[in-house]
Image: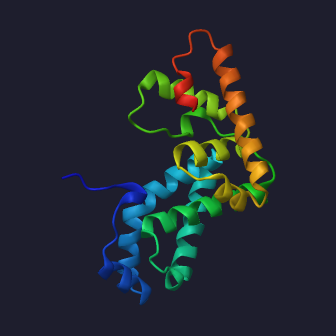
Amino acid sequence: MTMATGFGAELDALTLARARRGDGRAFESIYRLYARAAYTLALRLTGRPDVADDVVQEAFMKAMEKLGGFRGDAPFGAWLKRLVANCSIDRLRADRRWVDGDAETLLLPAESGAEAQIEALGLLARMTPHARAALVLHEIEGYNHAELAQLFGKSESYSKSLLSRAIGRLRGMLDAEPAAPLSQDTVR
């Protein structure tokens, strides 16, 4: 029996109830359960470790404040994942600098081969933060265009256009690479 990790990890009802009552140890347990997944998502979206740290801190602070509003319609991890994504997008929007991160700081699923990971990291690092965020959220995290539009504060057509351009740019970079180890299936 495999135990789910990351945002898929289950939070037991007792810990959630204790955290809602303000129990610091319960919230610490929640943090330990989801912090790595939160950081990984924030880093994928922002491309910068220092910003990802800030985003995670902000997201968990908001989670503490809004815990009473968690209705349980979706798993807690999904609720927290959306909160981290929202905080990441808000931070990108506020920074307005759109600084790209180093390839070494971006994370991909561990199942990918080392050569493919290095290639993909380099390609993602060359994308603009908006394009990288749209690509990661849609293709890796499973967000739909309505959710992306809401996160970016734009229309669904903006989300579709941004994603289409990001995939096109990624394909163009793959075509330009001599003997690129990533297949077109990796892009979409």
Number of numbered callouts drawn:
0
Q: Is residue 99 visible?
A: no
Q: Residue furthest bottom?
A: 21
| Residue drawn at 48 percent across, 64 percent down | 78
Instruction: Point out residue 65 in the picture as x, y percentages from the top left corner.
Output: 56, 82
Q: Is residue 38 left or right of residue 3?
A: right
Q: Is residue 13 left or right of residue 140?
A: left
Q: Residue furthest left?
A: 1
Instruction: Point out residue 176 in the picture as x, y percentages from the top left corner.
Output: 68, 14
Instruction: Point out residue 20 in the picture as x, y percentages from the top left corner.
Output: 43, 86
Instruction: Point out residue 48 in the picture as x, y percentages from the top left corner.
Output: 63, 46
Q: Nearer the viewer, residue 111 or 145?
A: 145
70 up-or-down from 55: above or below: below
30 up-or-down from 170: above or below: below
| Residue drawn at 52 percent across, 27 percent down | 185
Q: Is residue 153 visible?
A: yes
Colour convention of the picture: rainbow
Q: Nearer the viewer, residue 71 or 45?
A: 71
| Residue drawn at 38 percent across, 58 percent down | 8
Q: Is residue 97 left or right of residue 62?
A: right
166 up-or-down from 56: above or below: above
Quarter occupied by residue 128:
top right
Q: Nearer the viewer, residue 84 or 54?
A: 84
| Residue drawn at 57 percent across, 66 percent down | 83
Q: Quadrant of the C terminus?
A: top right
